[in-house]
């Protein structure tokens, strides 16, 4: 088990070995979060889809009781677990459960549970086996959690908590593969906080940091759970919309801009500071078939909108390249307007 570096890998190994020693129809791992709720991090077998990612309140259900008290439970009624997981109106063919705590030091970090379709299936011998496996697995699972946390922190922007560009590249690559395979569309929206330098100069860098955090919060709350919000760098953000075409992308672009404009933001001196973002969207495959081309097209449209908002009569729009840095100009070199 010590060779496994992820929770799912560890539990896949544990469940495969456990099945030769203890009978079960389903197996699950519940881990305690910072708020003491339990989240199912692994489930396999009969009706496991009802437990996957389920959240159980502290002390509730079979696993919640075991984690709170640090003691195993033999032949618990399986339906109690499913009801605690939120499936109140759903029945289950599973009858009995054997649940043992995962403990590191004197603290239970979660529980391993096995379920069976036969009532009263589990014996004291089964309990001893699962307890011994849980004892050995606890440290490995804890190490896996530390590893996952470190990976998660490496993938997030420290100021805003949003994903970073490494995550964006990974997700766009995945969406490109999916879209090419299925013939579907997706889009990227690039946003830039207007007058950010002025906020820093007039109100201080702490206010600038807070402004970025507020924008990040608004973007996160305005996007769907399966979309990806990224701090692209400085005062720029990218939102990856995993489905939809041009109309959906433009609607979401406007919603994001409206959400930022609605932020009630004040500087250190209590004065209201208006926040607005310029934004541009690019859709696969109409605007490009690579990560770089899509981002460059969205970037160009974003800066065109920024120029139009700064000079409503259109003055200066044709000379937009004068306002762009060298790196950004290089990005545009292969992209037509």
Image (tube, rainbow, N blue to C red):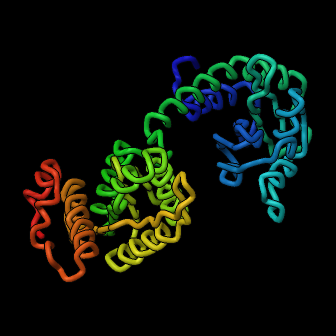
Q: How many marks?
A: 0
Residue at 75 percent across and 32 percent down: it is 110
Q: Residue furthest bottom?
A: 313
In the rendered structure, the answer to whether residue 147 lies left or right of residue 301 reads right
| Residue 21 seen in the figure | yes
Q: Position of residue 90 (x, y in %)?
A: 80, 62
Question: For this rendering, which residue is in front, 287 or 177?
Answer: 287
| Residue 96 seen in the figure | no
Question: For this rendering, which residue is in front, 100 or 221?
Answer: 221
> Where does the C terminus fall, quadrant-wise?
bottom left
Q: Position of residue 108 (x, y in %)?
A: 79, 27
Residue at 50 percent across and 45 percent down: it is 161
Question: For this rendering, which residue is in front, 230 or 7?
Answer: 230
Residue 294's image quarter?
bottom left
> Where does the N terminus fall, quadrant-wise?
top right
Residue at 38 percent across and 65 percent down: it is 277
Residue at 34 percent across and 48 percent down: it is 234
Residue 275's image quarter?
bottom left
**On screen, 91 above or below 20?**
below
Q: Position of residue 41 (x, y in %)?
A: 64, 41
**On screen, 215 above or below 132?**
below
In the rendered structure, the answer to whether residue 292 lies left or right of residue 230 reads left
Q: Position of residue 30 (x, y in %)?
A: 72, 38
């Amino acid at each position: 088990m010590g060779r496994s570096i992820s929770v799912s890998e560890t539990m896949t190994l544990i469940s495969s070995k456990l099945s030769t020693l203890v009978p079960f129809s389903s197996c699950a791992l519940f881990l305690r979060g910072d708020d003491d709720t339990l989240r199912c991090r692994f489930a396999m077998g009969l009706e496991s889809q009802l437990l996957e990612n389920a959240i159980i309140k502290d002390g509730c259900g079979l696993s919640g009781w075991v984690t709170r008290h640090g003691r195993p439970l033999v032949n618990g009624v399986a339906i109690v677990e499913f009801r605690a997981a939120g499936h109140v109106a759903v029945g289950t063919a599973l009858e009995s459960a054997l649940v043992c705590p995962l403990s590191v030091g004197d603290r239970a970090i979660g529980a391993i549970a096995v379920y069976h379709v036969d009532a009263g299936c589990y014996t004291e011998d089964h309990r001893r086996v699962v307890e011994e496996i849980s004892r050995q697995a606890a440290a490995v699972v804890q190490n896996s959690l530390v590893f996952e946390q470190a990976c998660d922190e490496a993938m997030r922007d420290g100021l805003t908590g949003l994903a970073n560009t490494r995550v964006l590249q990974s997700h766009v690559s995945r969406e490109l593969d999916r879209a090419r395979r299925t013939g579907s569309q997706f889009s990227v929206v690039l946003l830039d906080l207007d007058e950010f330098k002025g906020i820093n100069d007039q109100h201080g860098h702490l206010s600038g940091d807070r402004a970025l955090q507020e924008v990040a919060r608004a973007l996160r709350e305005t996007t769907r759970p399966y979309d990806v919000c990224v701090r692209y760098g400085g005062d720029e953000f990218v939102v990856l919309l995993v489905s939809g075409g041009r109309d959906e992308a433009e609607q979401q672009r406007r919603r994001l801009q409206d959400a930022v404009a609605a932020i009630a933001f004040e500087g250190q001196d209590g004065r209201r500071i208006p926040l607005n973002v310029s934004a541009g969207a690019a859709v696969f495959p109409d605007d490009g078939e690579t990560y770089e081309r899509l981002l460059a097209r969205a970037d160009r449209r974003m800066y065109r909108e920024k120029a139009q908002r700064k000079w409503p009569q259109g003055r200066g729009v044709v000379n937009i390249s004068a306002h762009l840095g060298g790196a950004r100009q290089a990005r545009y070199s292969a992209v037509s307007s």
